[in-house]
Image (cartoon, rainbow, N blue to C red):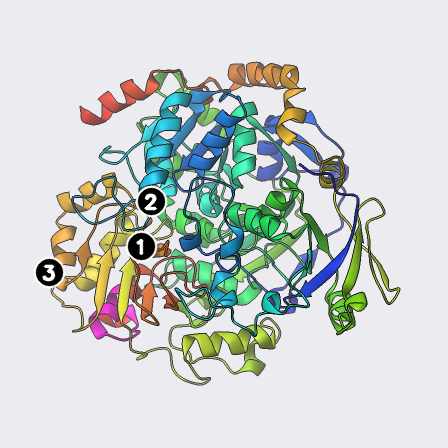
Amino acid sequence: MEPFTTLTAIAAPLLRDNIDTDAIIPSREMRSVTKTGLADGLFAGWRYSGVSSREPDPDFILNDPRFAPARILLSGANFGCGSSREHAVWALAEFGFRAIIAESFNPIFRGNCVNNGIVPVELGCDAIARIAASLGHWPANQQVTVDLQRCTVSTAQSDLWQFQIDDEAQEMLLGGMDAIELTLTRRDAIDRARAADRLRRPWIYLEQGREDSAKEQITN
Amino acid sequence: MEHSAGNLIEKETAPGNRAGRTLFDKIWTIHQAAEINSETDLILIDRVLLHERTGAIALKSLAAAGREVLAPSQVFVTMDHVVDTLPGRTDATSMPTGTDFIVATREFATRAGITLFDLGDPDQGIGHVISPELGIVLPGTTLVCPDSHTCSQGALGALAWGIGSTAAEHALATSTLRVKRPRTMRITIDSVLAAGVTAKDLALYLLHRFGSAGGAGHIVEYAGTAVTALDVEARLTLCNMATEFGAFSAIIAPDDKVFAFLKGRPYAPGDADWAAAIASWKELRSDEDATFDAEHRIDAAEVTPMVTWGISPQQAVPLDASIPHFADVAARDPRELYDRALAYMDLAPAKPMIGLPIDAAFIGSCTNSRISDLRRAAKILAGRKIAPGVTAICVPGSTRVREQAQDEGLDQIFLDAGFEWRESGCSMCFYAGGESFGHRQRVISSTNRNFESRQGPETRTHLASPETVAASAVMGAIADPRGFA
């Protein structure tokens, strides 16, 4: 995963509350058992003019040439609610987004962002409204900076906001770390905890082959 | 999110000052394998549940990284999301590439040595229906699944939550997850639900009252007399929609109803462990003096049958109410969402919900497809016919539920009324590019999401209880099931 420190990029405003993962990537766009090939389906229901069309809807923000190179998305409350599909984050990442600034995030979506190098930035609605208002017609005004080390968001108009992110997420994103690799370094602790738990709650630790006996029980 | 209507009581309580412990605290503590930092722990995961839609990619990616499943006997995978539900189904799917997901799941599940509930297996079904049914989820367990409705399973006193595919890989490879401790919320629902008011109505009422981010950041414990009065299947319905509530998950303290429900289930503790298991499960309740980060109290008597009118589950109203004016919901719905919902649903304010003509009716999904749901719907349909022109479909939540319903003759009641009777699966709870309700069709549905195009291209979904769906199918318009007794 690519480490994230600071990003200065064009921000695209999509100021709606409750943007769900069905809207971010409709299920019909998840065609293969892979994490790639999803950018084309990003926001398909809003981005294209018809249900089965690929004709860009000129009113949708990402079809505006000024915002096409955006790498930061600006949105409302409860962003990423609904289905847990990580495809939503894979699609956003493949399209080029590295940070999402929103009032709040769905918890599963937020975790998926961190696991894929996208920074979920929470800011108040006033700050978001002000940033959105500052995104003028001049490309220079559309630049927003997300600094993950200092936990700040700043604009070309010299506005500066502080945001909060938990230590674990910040560390993973800054280091571009693989959580599984990191956890496997604690394999001893895991084995010890499982062994102790097995004594307390033996019924949790199903034996291999239990399935067959369970199946027999059903058919009898 | 607006809390003013909800009697939200915020309490500043440092964890160290807590005299009593919550149900959540107790489960969390026994699963702490290590501390990552002051707010995040490495938590033991007792059960991983997968399905072919998001599980296949997790298993494939894990194999590609050269990693193995640490505890295969604790991992289960089902085929539910993209499988067809028409009788006589095969690996072929109406979703254009669905077969790829089925074949990959089968291949990687076999390779990993995990238990697979394949097509044709008598235990196949929707993950959140079969897991309780087979005793895979147990009180006090941690269970994760790359599926947002995993919170359903908190109904049995488990800490069960939805994750992404990468987190699922982590759980498979390490039997743990790195989890930030959620805040705690208790929603106490006192008094009793009136006759004809169901757990689904209660879930929609909570969304209507507190909004779709009302539980954000919290593990929500449902408590109170109206909750303990619910049977286990109704509790699964209530907890199911905690994800629509934005919560980390939901949980209900396990009681004798749960223990009786689990006794003798295939993966539940056997006779040798049963007494010890019960003894430990009886500890799983919040102490009298436990404190929560947030508390709400609800009077169950206020809850009436509910239905959604818009495109977010929070856009719910009592069935006998009208579509709200903006001023009625301004505290919760932003103007943009309200206007978009009205336009998408082709509705106008002040129009009554009852009598709104429908094109289709759907009974199914992890919310409302269990045997008790089908029995209640069948009671309304018995001796009646659905209205001409209405497409009506019933999809049992599992193969076991389907068999049970057939033993009771419920299938014939659905068929005689004009419903289709399907094989089990998620079916048209969501549109994946294959089968769907038609363009701009209005559907009354026992599912959990009314998002734009969720059940088909520009399909208009109204969420309600199975009873309301059945009554509406008969009337050809949204109807109150209480008149059908």
Callout 1 environment at 10 Å: few (<14), some (14 to 19), or many (20+)? some
Which residue is label 3 attached to? B416
CA distance separating discs 2 and 1: 9 Å
Q: Secondary structure at mark 2?
A: helix
Whether label 2 touches label 1, CB < 8 Å:
yes
Residue B480 on the magenta segment: yes
Q: Position of residue A5 (x, y in %)?
A: 79, 43
Instruction: Tell me where residue A182 sits by quadrant.
Output: top right
Q: Residue beneath label 2, please? A: B98
- Identify the subunit bearing mark 2: B
Q: Residue at x 14, y 68 (%)?
A: B385
Disc 1 target residue: B434
Q: Which residues are magenta?
A: B470-481
Q: Which amino acid type is marked by label 3?
A: Asp
Separation of marks 3 and 1 at Cα, in angstroms: 27 Å
Dot placed on the residue nearer the N-terminal end, 3 or 2? 2
Q: Position of residue B66 (x, y in %)?
A: 53, 21
**Reading the chain from its start, which is encountered first: label 3 or label 1?**
3
What subunit carries mark 3? B
- What residue sits 40% from the left and 84% below the top? B351
